[in-house]
Image: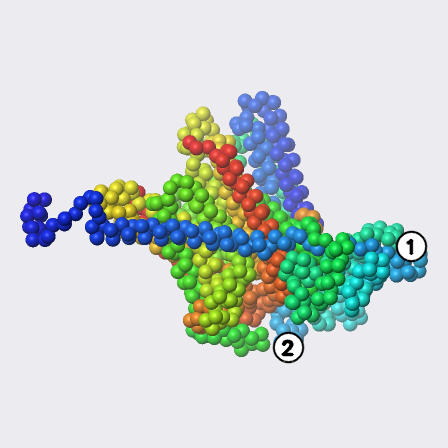
Amino acid sequence: MTDATSSGGATPRHSSSLLTQDARTLKRNAAESRFRAYGLSAVVIAMLALVFLLGSILHNGSSAFRQTFITLDVYLDPAKLDKKGTGNAEEIRKVTTFGYAPLIAASFEKLFEEEGIGVEGISAKKAGDLISKEGAADLRRFVHEDTTRVGETVSFSFLASGRIDGFFKGRVTMESAERDSNVSPAQLMLAEQLKEAGHLKTSWNWGFLTMADASENRPEAAGLGVAILGSFYMMIVVLVLSLPIGVAASIYLEEFAPKNWITDIIEVNISNLAAVPSIVFGILGLAIFINFAGLPQSAPIVGGLVLTLMTLPTIIIATRASLKAVPPSIRDAALGVGASKMQAVFHHVLPLAAPGILTGTIIGLAQALGETAPLLLIGMVAFVREFPAAPPEGFFDPASALPVQVYNWTQRADPAFVERASGAIIVLLVFLLIMNAIAIVLRRRFERRW
Amino acid sequence: MNAGLVILAVIALATLGYFVGRARALAKAGGDIRGLHSLPNYYGQTVFLFTAVPALLVCVGWLLLQPLYVEHRVSDMITPADIAEGSSQSLVMADIRRIATGLDTAVARGALTGADLSSLSADATDVRALLAGVGVALASEVKGSVLAAAKEYRAATATLKMAMSVVVILIALAGFVLSLRRLRPDFRARNVSETAIKALLILASSVAILTTVGIIFSLVFETANFFGLHSAADFFFGLTWNPQFRGGSDLGILPLLWGTLYVSFVALLFAVPIGLLVAIYLSEYASNRVRTIVKPAVEILAGIPTIVYGLFALITVGPLLRDYFAQPLGLGTSSSSVLTAGLVMGVMLIPFVSSLSDDVINAVPQSMRDGSYGLGATQSETVKQVILPAALPGIVGAILLAASRAIGETMIVVMGAGAAAKLSLNPLEAMTTITVKIVSQLTGDTEFASPETLVAFALGLSLFVVTLGLNVLALYIVRKYREQYE
C-alpha cells in the first residue's frame, strides 16, 4: 500500500472530509436513490395495474346484480287465454306467448286510467315495450304452473327491457335515446312516472345467477345458470380424474421410479406439459375426444377431460413437492417395523402429505375454472338455453362454462351485455377467491413443518 | 346396455369380490388370521383388482376402437356416386351419423317402431321430414344408399354395444372366479396386489406421455393433411392471410407471426423492466412489512384468469388508448390494437417475470453481496454490478419462459388485438396473431376437409414447436445456472 501512495504522489489529494460529500459521492448517492425510486415506482405501477384492473371490472360489473322490475296488476282474461271457456289446462297451454302481450297492454291501460299516468304519444300497447320481450313468456310460464289462475287478477313483477334498465343504471340517457331506435325519450319519461308511482323499482337480481342465457335482443333476461352448472360439472370431472391419476403418478415418480431414461423422459414431459399453451390442449381435445372418439361437442365431459390433462402437471408438481417434504425417517421407521414399501407409502407418507396435495389440487382446479381458450375450440361457445340434465347423462348434454359465457357476451352488439360480462367475471373471481381461501386455510391449519 | 351401467356393474362385482375374497381366505385359514400369508384385506384386494382392472381396460379400449371399426364398415357402403358435387366422403359420413342418431331418437320417442324402421325406405317415406319432427335437421333429401348405410351404422353400433357389455361382464366374472379359486392361506396376496397396484401407478404416470403423444399425433396428422391440400411454400413464406371459403385462399403464416411477435415484444418491453425492478426492490430494499403486502398482491395478478385480462383490454384499456392516443395522434381508430393487447399482456406477465427473477436473485450467495459492500459499493452498485451479472442466466431463462407464455397466450389477443392480418409497424393498429386465427378457424361450423380449417392445425404445430423450443432452452439455462451455486 505504501508503494501506491508514493507513486500516486503526482495526483492531487482530495481535500475531503467525512462531513462534506465530494462530487463523486454525491453522484453515487444520487444514483443510489434514483435506482431505489425506480424500484419503488415499478412496485407502484404493478399495484396500480392490479387496482385498476379489479376496479374497472367491479365498476362495470356490479350493476349486473341489480335489475329493474315493473310490477303490474295483470287480469288473466279468460276471453283471451281460454276462449272456449272450458278451463281445460291443455287448451290454456296452447295459447302462444304472443297471446299474452294484449294482457300486458290491458293492464297498462288500466294503470293509465286509474292513476293518471301517461305520456303523450305512448299508447298502452307501446308502453308494453317497456317490459322485456321475455315478460310475456314469463307470464305464460306463471299461468302454466297453475292454470286455475285464469280469471284472477295477479300482481306480477316483469323484467324491464334492457334500455329501461340501462336508463336507471345511467347507461342510457335522454340524449342517447333520441338516436336509439329501440327506445324513445317519451318511454323513458313514462318509466320515470312509473317509478314515482312505485310500479318500477330496481332491486337485487337473483335471476342473473339462476337464469339461462338469452338471445341477442334481450340482455335483461340473460343469466349465468347454465354456465355455472356447466363449470361445476367440468370441475367434478376434473377432480374425479386428475386427483387419483395425479397422485398415483406422483407416488410412482417420487417413491418407486428407478432413475433411468424412461423416468427422465416422463419428468421432462411433465414440466413441458405445464408450459404448453392452453390452446394446444383445445386442439388436442377437438382432434382426439371429438373427432376421433366421437364424444359430443359442447359437452362438459369433453371440457372436463381437456382441463384434466391441463391440470395434471400442476397436481403432479404439487404432490411431488409435498411427498418430498415428508422426512425419510417416517419411511425408515415404517420399513423398520416390517411394513412393505407400498404400506409405508400408503399408510404413512401419503396421509402426512395429504394437506399439501389438497392445496395443490384446489389451486389446480382454480386454474382450470378460469381457463377459456381450449373450451372455445371444443364448441363450448354454442348458444345453450337448456339446462343440462342431472349427472351422469348431464355430462354429455351441451352446456356453457363461466369464462366462455363471458367471452360469448363480449361478442354481442348490445352494450348491456358488457355489464353482464363484467358481472360474470365478478362471479368467477368470487369462486376463485373462495377456492384460494380454502387452499390457504388448509395450508395454514394442517401443513406440518418438519 | 349403457357403457356407464356396464362399468358400474363391474365395480359392483369387484366390490362384492373384495368381501367374498376376504371372507373366503379367512375361512380357509380356519378363522385364524395367523394362518394366512398376508392380512385378510389383501386377499380381498386381489380379487377386486383381478375382477375390475382387466374388464375396465377392455371396456375403455373397446369404446375407443368401436367407432373406428363401424365407420370403416359403413364407409365401404358409400359409392362415389353418393357423394354429391362439392361434398366429400367425410361430409356424407357426418350425414350418416346424424341420420342414425335421428333414427335412434325417433324410436326412443315412439315416432317409429322397430318394424317401421326395418321397412323404412327412402323412396316411400320422407325421411327428412320424419327426422325434422324429432329435432334433427338435415341439409338435403336422404338418398336410398345413405339411408341404408345409416341403418347399418345404427345396427352395427347396437350389436357392438351389446357385444361389449357381454364381453366385459364375462371378463369380470372370469377374473372374479379365477382369483377366488386361487385363494389359499399360503397365497402371497400382498405381493400380488402390490405388484398390481404398482402397475397401476406406472399406468397413471404414463398419462403424461400419452398426452404429449396425443398432442403431437393430432397436430402432425392434420398438418400433413393440410400440406396435402395447400402448398407448404405459401404457408411458410406467404405474405398475405386471406382465407376464402370457396377455395383459392392465401394462407401465409408471416403476417400472423409478425403480429404474434409484435404483441409479445410490447408485452415483454413492459413486463421485463417492471417485473425485474419489482423483484430487485422486494429482495434487496423492501422492509418485511412491505414485502408481506406486495408479494401476495403481485401473486394475485398471476392467479387472475386470462379472460379477465381480455375483458379489461376490451372495455377499459382499448377505448382509453383509442380516445387519448390513437385518435388525437391520428394513428388509428380501432380500440383493439397491438399496444392494447401488449400492455395488458405485460401486466399479466409481471408476476411471472418477478417471481422467477426473485428466485434467482435470492439464489445468489450472500457472500457475494457482502464482498461488494466490503469494497465500499452502494446497494445499487452491488445490484447492478454483482447480483445482476451473477443472476443473468436465470433472468434470461425467466424472460424466455415469459416470452413463450406471451406467444401462446390466447384470450387477451382474441379480445384485445383484433382480427385483421397485417404487416404494419404502427402499434396502434389492429393486428392479429397465430392463436387468434386458430380460434377463428376452428370455432363455429368446422368441416375437416378444407384447407381453411386444417390450417389451424399447422398453426398449432408451429406454435407448439416455438413454445416448446423456448421452454426447453429456458429450462436448460436455468438448470445449468442453478448448479453453479449449489
Residue located at (56% from left, 71% from top):
B450
Displayed quadrant of residue B129: bottom right
| Chain of the residue where label 1 is placed in the rendered structure | A
Q: Please state which amino acid type lies under the numbered disc 2.
A: Glu
Judge from the rendering whether residue A156 lies leftward or rightward of residue A357; answer left or right.
right
Element at label 1: loop
Residue A80 image point, x, y percent: 88, 61
Q: What colour scheme was applied to this rendering of the protein?
A: rainbow
Please identify the quarter of the rendering in which residue A99 is found. Answer: bottom right
The three-letter amino acid code for the residue at tag 1 is: Gly
Instruction: Judge whether residue B60 can be spotted in this image.
Output: no
Q: Residue at x 27, y 44 (%)?
A: B369
Please tell me which residue is depicted at 65% across the width and 63% down the height of the picture. A172
Q: Residues within 10 Å of mark 2 (few under 14, many from 20)?
A: few
Q: Nearer the viewer, residue B438 or B89?
A: B438
Tell me the residue that label 1 is attached to. Answer: A87
**Measured along the vertical axis of the image, is residue B383 above or below residue B434?**
above
Q: Please, what secondary structure does the residue beneath circle 2 have?
A: loop
- Please name the residue shown 22% across and 42% down the image: B374
Spot occupied by residue B372 in the image (x, y as percentages of width and height): 24, 45
Q: Which residue is mark 2?
A: B85
